[in-house]
Amino acid sequence: MTAVPQLMTLAQWSRGTPWRLHLPHSQPHHALIWVTRGQTRATVGGIRRGVGAHNALAVPAGTLFSIEVAPACYGQVCLIPPGGPALMPDMPEHLRIREVQSQNELTGLLDAMTREENQRRPFADEAAQALAIMITVWLRRALIGQDAPPRPTAAQRLTAAYAALVEQDYATGQPMAAYARDLGVTPTHLTRSCKACCGMTAADLLVQRTLHAAREMLEDGDDAVRHVAAQLGFGSAAYFSRFIAQHTGVSPSELRRRARAK
């Protein structure tokens, strides 16, 4: 994980493969997403929300999230390493920035970071750190001016707790029913809450998180298929291969081969 803040477009963040953002996953960095054109939908901590133009979305490191980037949507993301001088919120935040001055302030800071990255002048890393601090100061000031969010419903609290557990334990291979038991609810109740809050069942959320991890390990790494299967809690390589084929239409080895051929 780099210790220097980075700025990129949403398209660059996906690295040309939509599944990297569309499937639930987490990042080792804090992320501040700034949308300036079009609309998209994001699911953060199990809660789905619409994100339109001049919306900012803060996603803390380690938070389960996904973004469905529409073709007409344009946005940027600033990735900020945790533990540094740039302070990000501990919880996800969604801001709708209506004041033009505030919109221009953030856009100007992001433009300055883009120039530093492109020109690579001396002390560019220090400049990026300083700009990241200014960006997070802008974020905290903007939060002061936002209306207080409504209290989360019982379904939202349950879904958020489930999303946190999934991110923590998805690689154990335990079924959705085990998560429901740990949360003190029935699988039916958990599924109903997830469906209402993020548009997918509790089982689907777990499957999609596992699928993201599997694709990332297969397409970006060199571990043998059987080792990937074991790391993700699958009882056998054959079961893992059927899982991958069911959700991608190809075998794990073919998925890796196609990724390397791009």
Image (tube, rainbow, N blue to C red):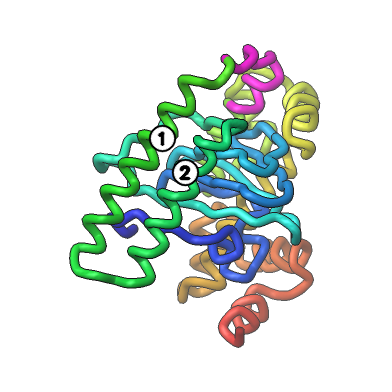
SS category of the residue bearing label 1? helix
Q: What residue is drawn where x is 49% and y is 48%?
A: 107
Which quarter of the figure has residue 180? Answer: top right
Horizontal placement of 62 versus 134: left or right? right
Give the answer, above or below, for where 15 lies relative to 101: below
Q: Is residue 159 magenta?
A: yes
SS category of the residue bearing label 2? helix
Residue 260 point in image, percent of width and height: 56, 83
Q: Is residue 198 magenta?
A: no
Disc 2 residue type (three-letter): Leu
Instruction: State whether residue 14 appears in this view.
Output: yes
Residue 252 point in image, percent of width and height: 64, 73
Marker disc for residue 186: none
Q: Are marks 2 and 1 in contact (CB under 8 Å)?
A: yes
- Marks 2/1: CA distance? 7 Å
Query: Which comes before the other along the chain, label 2 or label 1?
Result: 2
Give the answer, above or below, for where 106 lies relative to 90: below
Which quarter of the figure has residue 89? Answer: top left
Near-viewer residue (92 or 51): 51
Near-viewer residue (82 or 212): 82
Q: Which residue is mark 1?
A: 138
Instruction: State whether residue 169 appears in this view.
Output: no
Q: Residues within 10 Å of mark 1 (few under 14, many from 20)?
A: some
Q: Which residue is mark 2?
A: 106
Q: What residue is drawn where x is 54% and y is 46%?
A: 33
Near-viewer residue (202 or 224): 202
In the picture, the quarter occupied by the C terminus is: bottom right
Magenta part of the chain: 148-160
